[in-house]
Amino acid sequence: MDPATIIGIVLAFGAVVAMVTMEGAHLSALLLPAPMVLVFGATIAVGIASGTIKDFLTAVKALPRALRGKVEPPQQVIDQVVGLAEKARANGLLAMEQEADSVDDPFLKRALQNIADGTDGDELRVLLEDEIATRSKKDRVAAKFFSAMGGYAPTIGIIGTVVSLTHVLENLAEPGELGPMIASAFVATLWGLLSANFLWLPLGARLRRLSELDVERMTLLMEGVLAVQSGSQPRLLGERLRAMVPDGDADKSAAKSAKPARGAKDPVEEAA
């Protein structure tokens, strides 16, 4: 689990609370139900109106993933593929059917099953690339939904302020109450800006980033299983996959500290 989003949102709202406290104001002046209902309710409503019900449901289902941010580390993917390559060299490609039954990742499971079924390498590449593209497209729908709400929220906050100021103008005969009423009117704008920049836009950006990482993971798996199908040597396969990962995302020293491939001699033994 990567708690970056939760930590960031908590710190952002914490900074607002700290500012309000240092200014000597009261949080109760900001926690007004009417403007909050308008901003959050109308933002979600126009977000739904801008797409389809299916888009809305996709975004709701993606919300837990945005908060958890669980992404498999590249080195773990590489180690898994290298292990598959070793088993394929030792037991043949038919052994991939048994491996497919033991993995939880649907993408990898289908890839291994196709290898065991004897699917042509070019056809398998097209199949896996299409699946990656479809997954990326689905993730973009959820990210776009939250980003769109981030664009609507500030304007809806301004609408709430205009409505409240209209009410203020109706009560000019009571000058003693104008100050609190005007202050309350701007709370809608505040919540529009806060919700956009503290919630909706970060969630949209988070989902886009998670989608990028997921595509990179699936691409590693695709290149790995295709290399397994072609009979690539496990150690060289590991080095090739590590070369596909940006510096720092994978343990570059793993290639040096890894066990020698089956049948290879240990460098120390050769020196002796």
Image (cartoon, rainbow, N blue to C red):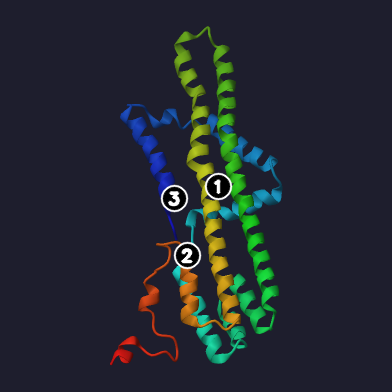
Residue pictured at 67% horizontal, 43% vertical: 48
Q: Nearer the viewer, mark 1 or mark 2?
A: 2
Mark nearest the camera among 2 and 3 is 2
- Going from N to C along the chain, the mark reached first, 2 or 3, is 3
CA gap between label 1 and label 3 equals 14 Å
Q: Residue furthest left?
A: 272
The outermost residue toward the front is: 271
Q: Which residue is mark 1?
A: 204
Q: Residues within 10 Å of mark 2 (few under 14, many from 20)?
A: some
Q: Nearer the viewer, residue 54 or 134?
A: 134
Residue 77 is at least partly visible in this image? no
Q: Are marks 2 and 3 in contact (CB under 8 Å)?
A: no
Residue 96: name its quadrant.
Answer: bottom right
Residue 6: give its label: 3
Quadrant placement of the N terminus: bottom left
Which mark is drawn over residue 245? Answer: 2
In this picture, residue 265 sits left or right of residue 46 = left
Asked if 170 appears above or below 91 in the picture, the reply is: above
The image shows residue 26 at horizontal and vertical percentages of 37, 29
Q: From the viewer's side, name the closer residue of 188 and 267.
A: 267
In this picture, is 184 found above or below 53?
above
